[in-house]
């Protein structure tokens, strides 16, 4: 029997048979053209993931309007100009052998005008401490416009060939902000009571259902299991939301946690395996397929999580940025050839791919195994950088061997042992 027999089993999400249980988690790359259309780099990046045995490739955070984006080169969705590129992207992922999924979102009050050149808006006035811009409160007409933009984006994604569409209800972005009493201080129809805080999501789903009853059964949702703010959103608080999505026959839920304000906490929680526990707890609340993620670095770990029934599928982001061939290599028993994301070895050791934290906003990765650099227009990866990477890796490996490594393994083992 293969080491990865559970991972290799297909799964039905809505009307789509996904060939295995590995998900490339949503990643925004800031590599779209200036008008938000799909560039060659975007095509090559996601096409390359699709060609490497990943069951489902999620194209990250496509904003439903220019105002809803976090950076000038984010992907946009909804307008006619996006159709051509989105069709090319979906068919590229299919032709390379994977299932294409696209995530739709609006950045909301976590926007940063410095990067997006747009005004920053939210359900209420709110300021991310690290950014320091207070958002403008949306009026009801503007909220209705955003609801319609979500519907247009979702419908366009399916029309362009994406098999599943993931609505972003987490990470402190606009829809999360409406759901959360920490960020939503309104006292009209869109704020106050829980049903009012849910209204924007309910309206989007109603409008989508009016287009076709079949749409929501091919939708997934990014759900926040904890935003690390006392009294704000966690799974218990999100129970009504989950019931609503269940009633709409959603295909899957992808569990996440944290908002910009509490970003520091999420890496610690991930290291301790809390994100997997969120997936396990969500699985107890629903029959819908659950995708776990956060610090999953190997297929071995994914196989254990599925075996322990903590999730139905698992996602990886940084591990696949660092080595997009991880799955192919592992299926071919070449796990020792996988090059790791160093941030997974030591929290805080690298932020290079987190372009919003960089000065030049270009998305790239420091490992020599990361996405084909020859495809980058401004290839600045030199032999010097490669040597520096190997040195860093050696040092980190030394740092975490012995007691520290044993500790990390013990934490993970005892955690998984609980289930
Ligand atoms: C460069 C980068 C971009 C990301 N973009 C998105 C995104 O567009 N949407 C989203 O929901 N999560 C996004 N994430 C979060 C990842 O999907 C993932 O949940 C997180 O990195 C933890 O998983 P990991 O330990 O496998 O990296 C991004 C992460 C990184 C590193
Ligand atoms: S750039 Fe750094 S943090 Fe990002 S995937 Fe590569 S090694 Fe990991």
Image: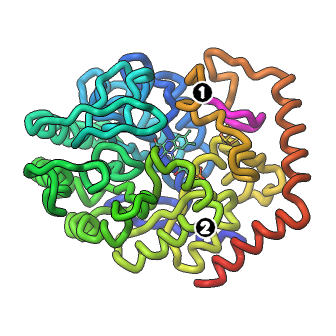
Please identify the quadrant where the N terminus is shown: bottom right
Q: Are marks 1 and 2 in contact (CB under 8 Å)?
A: no
Instruction: Residue at 62% x, 35% y: name it.
Output: 353
Q: CA distance from mark 1 to mark 2?
A: 27 Å
| Above or below, 14 relative to 307 | above
In the rendered view, tell whether residue 145 sits above or below residue 2.
above
For mark 2, what is the residue? 273
**Residue 17 visible:** no
* Quarter of the rendering containing residue 60: top left
Q: Position of residue 310 (x, y in %)?
A: 52, 75
Secondary structure mainly formed by the magenta segment: loop
Please provide the residue range marked out in magenta.
363-370
Q: Residue 359: x and y, percent?
A: 59, 22
What's the mark number on residue 358?
1
Secondary structure of residue under mark 1: loop
Q: Is residue 293 above or below residue 82?
A: below
* Left or right: 261, with 63 as reference point: right
Of callouts 1 and 2, the N-terminal one: 2
Give the number of the disc on residue 241: none
Mark 1 close to ligand 2, CB under 8 Å: no
Provide residue 167's location: percent of width, then percent of height: 32, 49
Residue 152's x, y, as percent?
Answer: 20, 37
Mark 2 element type: loop
Is residue 368 located in the magenta-colored stretch of the structure?
Answer: yes
The quarter of the rendered structure image containing the C terminus is bottom right
Going by the picture, which residue comes out furthest to the bottom? Answer: 418
Does residue 109 appear left or right of residue 51 in this picture? left
Local packing at callout 2 (Cα closer than 10 Å; few below 14, some 14-19, many 20+) is: many
Examine the rendering and report whether any part of residue 269 can be seen: yes
């Amino acid at each position: 029997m293969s080491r990865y027999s559970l991972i290799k089993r297909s799964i039905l999400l809505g009307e789509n048979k996904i060939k295995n249980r590995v998900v490339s988690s949503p990643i925004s790359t800031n590599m779209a053209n200036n008008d938000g259309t799909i560039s060659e780099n975007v095509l090559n990046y996601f096409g390359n993931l699709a060609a490497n045995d990943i069951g489902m490739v999620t194209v990250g955070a496509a904003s439903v309007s220019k105002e809803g984006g976090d950076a000038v080169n984010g992907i946009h969705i909804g307008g006619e100009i996006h159709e051509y590129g989105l069709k090319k992207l979906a068919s590229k992922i299919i032709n390379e052998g994977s299932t294409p999924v696209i995530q739709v979102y609006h950045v909301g009050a976590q926007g940063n005008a410095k990067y997006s050149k747009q005004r920053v808006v939210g359900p209420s006035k709110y300021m991310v401490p690290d950014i320091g811009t207070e958002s403008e409160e949306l009026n009801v007409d503007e909220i209705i416009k955003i609801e319609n933009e979500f519907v247009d984006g979702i419908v366009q994604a399916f029309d362009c060939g994406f098999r599943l569409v993931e609505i972003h209800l987490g990470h402190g972005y606009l829809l999360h902000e409406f759901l959360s009493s920490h960020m939503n201080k309104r006292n009209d129809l869109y704020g106050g009571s829980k049903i009012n805080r849910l209204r924007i999501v309910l309206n989007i789903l109603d409008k989508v259902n009016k287009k076709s009853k079949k749409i929501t059964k091919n939708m997934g949702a990014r759900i926040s299991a904890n935003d690390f703010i006392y009294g704000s959103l966690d799974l218990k608080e999100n129970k009504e939301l989950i019931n609503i999505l269940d009633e709409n026959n959603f295909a899957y839920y992808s569990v996440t946690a944290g908002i910009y304000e509490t970003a520091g906490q999420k890496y610690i929680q991930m290291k301790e395996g809390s994100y997997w526990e969120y997936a396990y707890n969500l699985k107890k609340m629903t029959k819908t397929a659950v995708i776990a993620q956060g610090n999953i670095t190997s297929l071995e770990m994914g196989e254990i999580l599925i075996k322990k029934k903590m999730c139905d599928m698992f996602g990886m982001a940084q591990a696949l940025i660092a080595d997009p061939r991880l799955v192919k290599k592992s299926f071919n028993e070449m796990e020792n050839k996988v090059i790791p994301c160093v941030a997974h070895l030591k929290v805080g050791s690298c932020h290079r791919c987190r372009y919003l934290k960089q000065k030049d906003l270009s998305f790239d990765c420091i490992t020599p195994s990361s996405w084909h650099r020859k495809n980058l227009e401004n290839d600045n990866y030199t032999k010097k950088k490669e040597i520096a990477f190997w040195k860093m890796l050696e040092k980190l490996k030394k740092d975490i061997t012995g007691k520290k490594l044993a500790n990390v393994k013990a934490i993970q083992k005892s955690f998984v042992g609980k289930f």
